[in-house]
Image: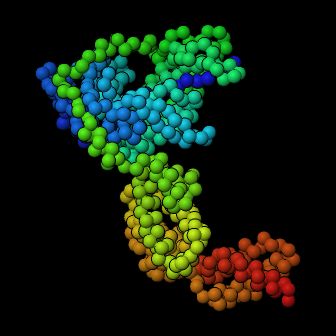
Amino acid sequence: MSLEPVIGLEIHLQLKTKSKMFCGCAAHEQGAAPNANVCSICLGHPGTLPVPNAEAVRFGVMLGLALNAEIAKRSKFDRKNYFYPDLPKAYQISQYDLPIAQHGFLEFDTPAGVRRISIVRAHLEEDAAKNTHSGDGSTLVDFNRAGTPLVETVTGPDFRSPQEAKLFLQELRLIARYLGVSDADMEKGHLRCDANISLRQRDEAGNVVGKEFNPKTEIKNLNSFRHVERALAYEIQRQTKLWQAGSPPAVTTTRGWNDAKQVTVEQRVKESEADYRYFPEPDIPMLELAALADDARHHLPELPAARRARFVEEYRLKPEDARQLCDDPALSDFTERVFSELQGWLNALPELDGAQDEQWETERKKLGRLVSTWTLTKLLGVLAERAADIRVAKLTPEHFAELITLIATKKLNATSALTVLNAMLDDGADPSHVMEDKQLGMMEDVDALADAIDRVIAQNPAEAARYRAGEKQLLAFFVGQVMRATEGTADAKETRNLLAVKLDDIGAE
Ligand SMILES: [Zn+2]
């Protein structure tokens, strides 16, 4: 008999709208003073009327579509009643039986292959205010967040490991960013997660023994991917011990994650749905979503999974490189434009005129590798050194593509190209100009390179003798000397080849 985790997630995603869900107050204003962005509606004054934010509804529908869900033709808002100081109306406007989206799924990559997780529903609601508990026992309430639009997504109980839950959340975050509906930054509270977990028994043949779903633990307010993974791993351990002791959890409980102690702590018994006394929000008419869903479907941007697959297929990238390039929408857009420049360049190369498919394939692969290496290691490395970001860097995809062509045609070696890249980032210059200014062009004169190599060998007779005696690792020393003699303008590969021949030739004499 073995124990298997059964995990489901409820995710709150803060939508990146200009104004709040039901009033015109600014949402997400950075650094606003507490209670600066409030009005009689989001403070819940009597007699005020909420008006749904069209942009929030559209964002919710887009997210539903991206999660392969059915968008409701008619959807309505409901009041979820509970009393807490962060909720001025003593109810939250949410959605109960007619959410905007239902019955979807999301597929994502895991080390064990593609996993598909069902999406039970996604609904719109308003966020609560933010409570700050101070040391003297008092609580301060900031209503700037009250009424900010949220989409709550509920998954099926389909996850079988903490790692799967984390990978799903990371993919969801990326989808939200590609759609532009949320920054989905967990540390900033744009993406908040509750996780449900229970265990069940399977026999050796893999059949579930006993109940399929046992009383679960709901872990509230997980605010980083690491916390999600660790809290679930802890719960699996804790519940496994209870099962092994013959006393598995008998009732559903709510726990919180204590990161300092790395444990979950019981909070309170969960309210049942009836406790919220849901009833239809009488002040907001039914939403008619059919036309909006049609329009949004036609304008949905390419999603990360599709873009990764296309990068592999179209640009011949390794799947892992495509994944890294697509992990940031801005970087993937940049890469896309670099490739579109380079496709034109490749098509116009005289040496590929009339070339066989096989040769085209080789060139495309080479180019793909060059672009991913120069983007993922060199460009991102230089940007990191400068604490800069691709979104604001003074680097156009056109200039970067030109740099790639200079490297591909051996007009620049790797060292010089890095110098050129830095200069390009300094002032947005184009690479050919930088190359001329700094005289970084490659030595194209083969005779001049041969002369330089002869000189270096003549200047280092002892090393040359040792090389000939079998110390072949000295080749690197000679390459270094030639590079120094040519001020880095020699092509390293050609230098290496020529050196090997000349060193051996001398030995044969
Ligand atoms: Zn307001």
Res 20 → quadrant: top left
Res 485 → quadrant: bottom right
- Residue drawn at the location 70% of the way across and 77% of the way down: 496
Residue 153 drawn above or below residue 444? above
Q: Residue 249: x and y, percent? A: 56, 12
Residue 327 drawn above or below residue 358? above
In-image side of 445 versus 68 (left or right):
right
Q: Residue 414: x and y, percent? A: 57, 71
In-image side of 48 versus 450 (left or right):
left
Camera sees residue 339: yes
Residue 483 drawn above or below residue 48? below
Q: Residue 252: x and y, percent? A: 49, 13
Which image quadrant: the N terminus?
top right
- Residue drawn at the location 30% of the way across and 13% of the way down: 277
Which image quadrant: the C terminus?
bottom right
* Residue ranking furthest to the left: 47
Asked whether 487 or 24 is in front, the reply is 24
* Residue ranking furthest to the right: 469
- Residue drawn at the location 57% of the way across and 52% of the way down: 320
Asked whether 418 or 49 is in front, the reply is 49
Residue 149 drawn above or below residue 322? above
- The tally of labels here is 0
- Residue drawn at the location 51% of the way across and 10% of the way down: 251
**Colour convention of the picture:** rainbow
Q: Residue 186: x and y, percent? A: 43, 37
In-image side of 98 versus 354 (left or right):
left
Camera sees residue 189: no
Asked whether 471 or 315 is in front, the reply is 315
